[in-house]
């Protein structure tokens, strides 16, 4: 059962143009992008710039875009979308508002929150004289009883369509691209078991779309002649079952054929838990993602073709999109990931501010004759496939426990195997601060009764270097104090070994690089 009901990709189909290849707009606009720290928004901004548009971004936490290459080319506005007056001021002189914010992983009440925020944005856009709002919603059948997540997407689209400002509301299904939540879910499910019992919804029809094609439509929407004010279904024009998508992924990834057994029960909650345990997606996201698959998600119309021509070379077929995503990950060229759009949290208070707080610190240091630059290379490459340099089984067990309680776990990995930027994720940590060559501070996003950070740093000392490591924990109540006492025996083994092994890995790296020099003398 491959579920294919559309023409497969013809042999010799030319590869679509690189995602960065964006046609210049005939009439450049001033645009404002919300959700620029998210998966789609973070990729859209550079393409809007490449098209010649002037770009503003509204961000609640500017540090989350501190490392992006396009930072100096945009106007950054530090504000929250809850502040209508500030948003109206930000929209002054703006032609097009891109609304790419959603609160899928924000817990209970996100549906009401999304609708309220959309209403605030619509009123601010109308008051500022914005010409158009562009929104990316979800593909869904008409008249069906939708999941909370899909119902919320539909409601937000209606808010914009009913506002005085012209709106273009795209409705897309599963988005396939390196780092997308949908792609990670398909990949990990496909790689977990060769024989997979699954709920009945794996037989539902799905029309996926490559992230490059989503971006193509979003950029083109800024230059459409108006008024438009309607929804457009977008997809790759190839319909598969969800089981067929997993089987096609396996074929492209070189895996043996996957047998997916569709059981006669929907079981969305049980399936959501299974997805959370076997993929990097946390339970707070896996449940709404799975619930969104309870119905067919196929484009009901292709009216967009009358307004925006298909990309040069055609829309990207599903399997080609999978190949492109795998290639980006293999080459370390993942621009954004779903995990990069995590929730905000308070930064680590500076040391003088610790007075009055209960705080526990495990501090280690290790002096060696290794050049600091090699120690830093190991520090910046920590986590993901490179591991944590001490007792991998202990880290894995803690990751599974975190997953079982709804946390991030260790499966999120990292966007690039060697380079990091502020705001990125590294397994269950998020990069809070990076002073390249000197300091890496990670903030924990695992479930724990308190707040935790891990600092790794290196500095020159004599002819070598000193590696320093601090684990910092702010307990919450008695349970936080008991938690710290419970993990102390593990810390006493893990952290000393970690400092030694990081330094040893740095020495191996230094020796490896010096080998060619010795052979040429």
Image: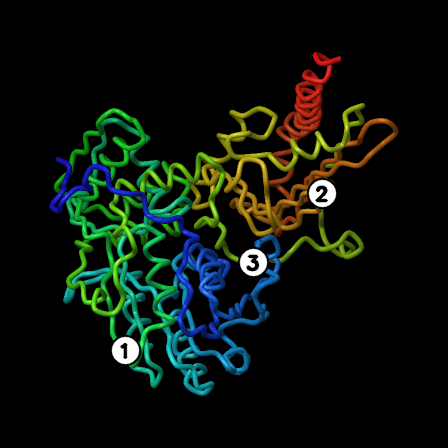
**How many angstroms separate mark 2 from mark 1 (CA)?**
49 Å
Horizontal relation, residue 159 to residue 458: left or right? left
Residue at left offset 31%, top offset 66% = 152
Q: Quadrant of the C terminus?
A: top right
Q: Viewer-proximal residue, 398 or 116?
A: 116
Rate crowding at label 1 as few (under 14), some (14 to 19) or many (20 or more) other CA atoms within 10 Å: some
Which sits in the foreground, 475 or 379? Answer: 379
Query: Pointer 1: what residue?
Result: 229
* Residue 246 found in image quarter: top left
Marks 3/1: CA–CA distance? 30 Å
Q: Earlier in the sequence, mark 3 or mark 2?
A: 3
Picture coordinates of residue 431, whole percent (x, y)? 60, 47
Position of the N terminus by quadrant: top left
* Residue in the foreground of this view, choosing between 497 and 252: 252
**Foreground disc of the pair 3, 1:** 3
Q: What x and y, as percent, mark residue 178?
A: 40, 44
Mark 3 in CB contact with mark 2 (< 8 angstroms):
no
Indicate whether 232 appears above or below 314. Answer: below
Residue 245 falls in image quadrant: top left
- Place of residue 23 in the rendered image (x, y in percent of width and height, measured from the top left): 39, 61
Query: Which structural element holds mark 3?
Result: loop
Give the residue number, with chain letter if any, for mark 3: 70
Front disc: 3 or 2: 3
Q: Which residue is mark 2?
A: 439
């Amino acid at each position: 059962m491959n579920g294919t009901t559309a023409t497969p990709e013809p042999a010799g189909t030319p590869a679509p143009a690189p995602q960065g290849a964006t046609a210049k707009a005939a009439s450049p606009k001033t645009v404002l992008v919300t959700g620029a720290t998210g998966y789609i928004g973070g990729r859209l901004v550079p393409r809007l710039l490449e098209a010649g548009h002037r770009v503003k971004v509204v961000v609640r936490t500017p540090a989350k875009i501190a490392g992006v290459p396009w930072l100096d080319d945009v106007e950054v506005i530090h504000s929250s979308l809850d502040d209508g007056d500030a948003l109206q001021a930000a929209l002054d002189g703006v032609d097009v508002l891109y609304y790419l914010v959603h609160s899928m992983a924000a817990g209970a009440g996100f549906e009401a929150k999304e609708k309220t925020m959309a209403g605030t944005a619509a009123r601010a856009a109308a008051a500022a004289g914005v010409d158009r709002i562009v929104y990316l919603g979800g593909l869904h059948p008409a008249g069906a009883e939708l999941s909370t997540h899909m119902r919320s997407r539909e409601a937000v689209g209606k808010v914009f369509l009913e506002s005085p400002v012209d709106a273009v509301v795209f409705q897309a299904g599963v988005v396939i691209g390196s780092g997308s939540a949908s792609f990670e879910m398909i990949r990990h499910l496909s790689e977990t078991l060769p024989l997979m019992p699954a709920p009945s919804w794996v037989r539902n029809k799905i029309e996926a779309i490559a992230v490059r094609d989503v971006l193509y439509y979003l950029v083109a929407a800024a230059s459409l002649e108006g008024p438009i004010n309607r929804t457009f279904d977008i997809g790759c024009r190839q319909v598969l079952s969800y089981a067929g998508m997993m089987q096609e992924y396996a074929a492209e990834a070189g895996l043996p054929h996957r047998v997916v057994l569709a059981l006669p029960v929907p079981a969305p909650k049980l399936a959501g838990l299974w997805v959370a345990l076997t993929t990097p997606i946390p339970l707070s996201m896996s449940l709404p993602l799975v619930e969104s698959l309870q119905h067919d998600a196929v484009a009901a119309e292709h009216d967009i073709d009358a307004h925006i021509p298909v990309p040069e070379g055609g829309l990207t077929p599903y399997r080609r999109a999978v190949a492109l995503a795998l290639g980006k990950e293999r080459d370390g060229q993942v621009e954004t990931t779903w995990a990069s759009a995590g929730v905000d949290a308070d930064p680590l208070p500076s040391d003088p501010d610790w007075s009055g707080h209960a705080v526990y610190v495990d501090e280690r240091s290790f002096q060696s004759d290794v050049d600091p630059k090699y120690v830093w290379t190991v520090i910046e490459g920590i986590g993901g496939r490179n591991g944590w340099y001490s007792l991998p089984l202990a880290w894995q067990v803690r990751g599974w426990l975190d997953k079982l309680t709804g946390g991030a776990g260790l499966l999120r990995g990292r966007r690039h195997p060697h380079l990091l930027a502020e705001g990125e994720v590294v397994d269950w940590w998020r990069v809070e601060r990076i002073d390249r060559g000197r300091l890496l501070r990670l903030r924990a996003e695992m479930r724990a009764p308190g707040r935790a950070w891990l600092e790794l740093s290196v500095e020159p000392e004599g002819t070598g270097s000193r590696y320093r490591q601090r684990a910092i924990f702010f307990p919450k109540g008695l349970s936080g104090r008991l938690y710290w006492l419970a993990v102390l025996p593990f810390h006493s083994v893990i952290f000393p070994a970690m400092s030694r092994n990081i330094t040893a890995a740095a020495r191996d790296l230094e020796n490896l690089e010096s080998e060619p020099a010795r052979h040429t003398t």
